[in-house]
Amino acid sequence: MFDTLTERLTQSLRNVSGTGQLTEDNIKDTLREVRMALLEADVALPVTRDFIAKVKEQALGQDVLQQLSPGQAFVKIVHDELTRMMGEANETLDLAAKPPVVILLAGLQGAGKTTTAAKLARYLKERQKKKVATVSADVYRPAAIKQLQTVSAEVGAEWITSDASEKPIDIVNRAIEQAKIKFADVLIVDTAGRLHIDDDMMDEIKALHQAIAPTETLFVVDAMTGQDAANTAKAFNDALPLTGVILTKTDGDARGGAALSVRAITGKPIKFLGMGEKLDALEPFHPERIAQRILGMGDVLSLVEEVERKIDREKAEKMAKKLQKGGSFNLEDMLTQFEQMKKMGGMAGFLDKLPGMSGAGIQQALDQAQPEKQVKKMEAIIQSMTVKERRNPDIINPSRKKRIAAGCGMEVQDINRLLKQHSQMAKMMKKFSNPSGLSKMLRGVQDMQKKMGGMTGMGPLFGNNDKK
């Protein structure tokens, strides 16, 4: 997400970051480039105009902080204005109401409401420790009812039955009573997809909203529709008292115009981002962190939280104790690390949140390096070894290498590359021989980033391992 915008903005701001004094002349070209970058990212024209006007006003009227160069101050102004435009801070769900707290999901056909209902149920269950029930009021598409039943079971949510022969209001009223009986903390209501120009369908959801008075009414919208996402959200907000927006399919949106426009156009906060197809791919929307990512500063805080949430603590502690006692990092441990990286969304998901590692250039380098493909090859090699070989890589002699290569359909050179990479990884792991080592390293990167004014650059992480 934001790859194209990040590439354009970081290049534009680089031209002014070393400037000794901010004047209207030397920021004019930069502001023009920023304006074009926002418009190309499909940010709404009124939002872009307002953004440029406020950045210009602050840049020319501000007393520059002594510890920052004027160029860095300009970057900070852009960062702060991006944050303001997207809503200042994350706005959480209101879960303080008397249970069951009813969350109503509305949106267009194909926006991903049913999948989002399951993702939200999982999020509330795992991170908020809530007992969640779900119900489908989509009486026009029986397959949607079955789909919600299936995905609710996958995330461990209570599913309340419904039937296409019932009226939506009757379904939800019955579901609220059943949720009370089941002692559910939250009831998520999935509704039929509709077009905002369809008066009958809009009247139906208005009547449903009025009848059940949900605590949260969230508009689910496809981020890839760009500026139309913000305009559609406004149309729904005119019909329903929305409390927030969930942007879906943001992993496929390289422009990011929807995220930058929705708050400004609707006045409603973006509460969550759907980051992929998996049912754990839902993240709270933090405007400041998104602004950092747009400007190539990374999102180290989110990465730290993700590491601490997704890394298997038991396996990490077991490995740490072994390394602390002088044990070696073997190939079984390497396999475990590959599993942990997959939980983090793979190398691409990891790098996207590191300072200086986002943008189209990095994505192109990733595409060429094909790290996920390389990991699969290494996994296949390790799995072709005996348990003894995995635990004692030093015993892998030329004859063993030939047997392993034949077993996985690769060349001996591939085995040699794996053993070299294992050796390098073993040295690195000794530096982080406790479960929180990676978190500490990432927090260190974050601290360094702050000291350097936010624009920390990272060197290339992919070398050519094919050199002999």
Image (cartoon, rainbow, N blue to C red):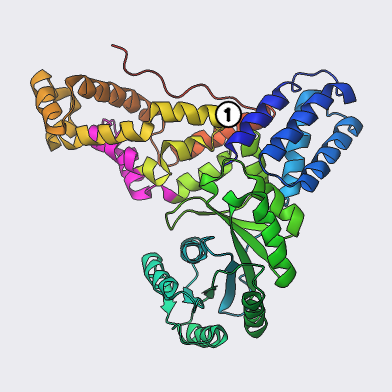
Amino acid of disc 1: Gly
Can residue 67 be seen here?
Answer: no
Which secondary structure lies at badge 1? loop
Q: Quadrant of the C terminus?
A: top left
Is residue 374 toward the left or the right of residue 108 in the image?
A: left
Dominant SS type (magenta): helix
Q: Position of residue 146 (x, y in %)?
A: 39, 73
Residue closest to the far top:
468
Could you tell me if residue 248 is visible in this image? yes
Residue 276 is inside the magenta segment: no
Rendered location of residue 40, percent (x, y) = 67, 37
Q: Is residue 394 left or right of residue 117?
A: left
First to last magenta residue range: 310-339
Identify the residue at horizontal 89%, vertical 25% (top origin).
24
Q: Quadrant of residue 425?
A: top left
Frontmost residue, 322 versus 208: 208
Which residue in the structure is indicated by mark 1? 356
